[in-house]
Image (cartoon, rainbow, N blue to C red):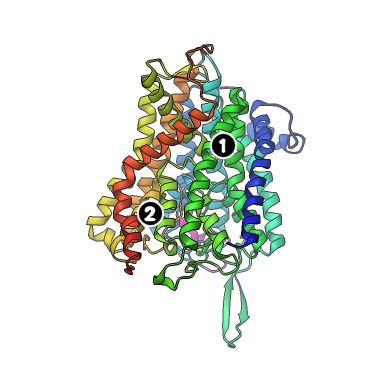
Amino acid sequence: MATHDIIQLVLFFTLIMVFTPILGKYISKVFTGEKHIMLPVLSWIERLTYRFTGINPDEESNWKSYAFSLLSFNLTGFIFVFLIQLFQANLPLNPSHLPNVTWHSAFNTAVSFMTNTNWQGYAGETTLSFFVQMIGLTVQNFVSAATGIAVLMALIRGISRRTTDKLGNFWTDLTRSTLYVLLPLSIILAILLVGQGVVQNFKVHESIQTLQGAQQDIPMGPVASQIAIKQLGSNGGGFFNANSAHPFENPSPFSNFLEMLAILIIPASLTFTYGKMTGSVKQGWVIFSVMMILLMAGLAISLYAEYSPNPIYGNTPLMEGKETRFGITNSVLWSTITTAVSSGSVNAMHSSLSPLTGMVTLINIMLGEVIFGGVGAGIYGMVIFIILTVFIAGLMVGRTPEYLGKKIEAFEVKMAILAVLAPSFVILVFTAWASVSKAGLAGLGNPGPHGFSEMLYAFTSAAGNNGSAFAGLNANSIFYNLTLGVGMLIGRFGIIIPVLAIAGNMAGKKITPLSAGTFRTDNWLFIGLLIAVILIVGGLTFFPALSLGPIIENLLMNNGITF
């Protein structure tokens, strides 16, 4: 690694730590009703939204009503995006006259963007019209991310409140997340990206003459507006097929730095928001520390693997599949944070990563997308592991487990286990199905363990609502569009519903005062125990599958065999 790479890494993580309390405090003000900087500017839009929709922002609901509102809203979004793809040839803003999307691809895409996964089995610039990209996908980028924040807010209220069944108002949380958090940041980032050369227009294409004298049509479109929210909302779906490896999505080293910063800034800040709103800022920093330790460990392994010389590729650092504009460090940093944060955007091809680096990207998702994770989703996913950790600690000392003064009982543990099992079921069972079925094997781009990794990565990405891919798998088929779509649904709502159930049950409990026998959850002992539980659960669940893919591929590559 060069000196400038080290400086960039230090600067990147320093900025994350600086922005975490600043943005985290602002977000807490948004949801606690305190005055904040955007209130005088945008409050009239909030009031107009409630008046237009007939919503009473002060009316709160229990967890079942909250879940029903969430599910009905997401179902509506799915139906809308599904239909506009089926009829895009007859809709406006289609200057390229693109045909209607096939039903199975439309299903997969509608589910993908509704669940904040943003898996793409198609090339955006040659498949979807401007209308679908803007009115369908970009809108879902906002509201799917806002849904994750809303669930986190409900969980925070469930933990911090006592003897009540009220968790807040989903519609209010959704509106405030979109209006005060996601929209202002997206406008700022979009302007900065346009300044760096990211395309933002309504042209069909730009005709140019190449150096060889040939004519080439370069696709255009409203790119910067989608890229901003794709990064900030941990969405990841690119306007172009090459995603952020495309020079019109990510033209310069500075735009690359901004886009990476945008991936991590809201999930990191929400750890501070969590601590602030639960009444214990130290708890927020504990979660931040656990996430950062796991992220840095994965990054260190990935950098080591990519920079280690190997005779099979000429004893040089591995540049295959990476943009020469960004180099190895930027590519590896992006691959690590995009899989840790369930963003799914890429600036290098994950299929070309070394086996160990590819394994890190898989593990980041397999652990439940809790290493910062998606916007909102990372924190409530981490709380699932916190519940399991304090439960195990309670068994060890023979005391009823507690977290932030609330007793953790059988119901919370059952729901936590259900939330852990749901995505694990998708990853293991669906990958096994694909590996023995003709339809599943037909999409492979490589044989051997690398081909298995392609399938494993696809279902891991779907279940973790990540959206990135190994890129060697042809997943735009009926089999993969349907199975991956179902996997995304299970991975999203198989966690959200148990989390809301936990929130509702904990809200009705009293807060137990601290005592000498209380197991502390705000110190380094708990940080170590929580990391151990996360790694053990992930290791026991997925090590056999990883052994068939990246682990054996790495061993074979060291012996001169590639796939």
Q: Nearer the viewer, residue 79 or 559?
A: 559
Mark 1 belongs to which amino acid? Phe
Mark 2 belongs to which amino acid? Ala
**Does 188 sit above or below residue 240?**
above
Residue located beneath label 1 in the image: 288
- State how far apart marks 1 and 2 are (Cα): 28 Å
Q: Is residue 171 visible?
A: no
**Does 149 sit above or below residue 277?**
below
Look at the image and give the residue range highlighted in magenta: 83-96
**Residue drawn 67% across the image and 32% down it:** 30
Query: Residue 370 at x, y = what percent?
Result: 48, 40
**Residue drawn 36% across the image and 37% down it:** 537
Residue located beneath label 2 in the image: 458
Per the rendering, the mark at residue 406 is: none
Q: Mark 1 or mark 2: which comes first in sequence?
A: 1
Mark 1 element type: helix
In this rendering, position of residue 138 left or right of residue 532: right
In this rendering, position of residue 520 left or right of residue 498: right
Q: Which residue is situated farthest in the bottom direction here?
A: 213
Mark 2 element type: helix
Assess whether residue 86 is covered by the magenta stretch: yes
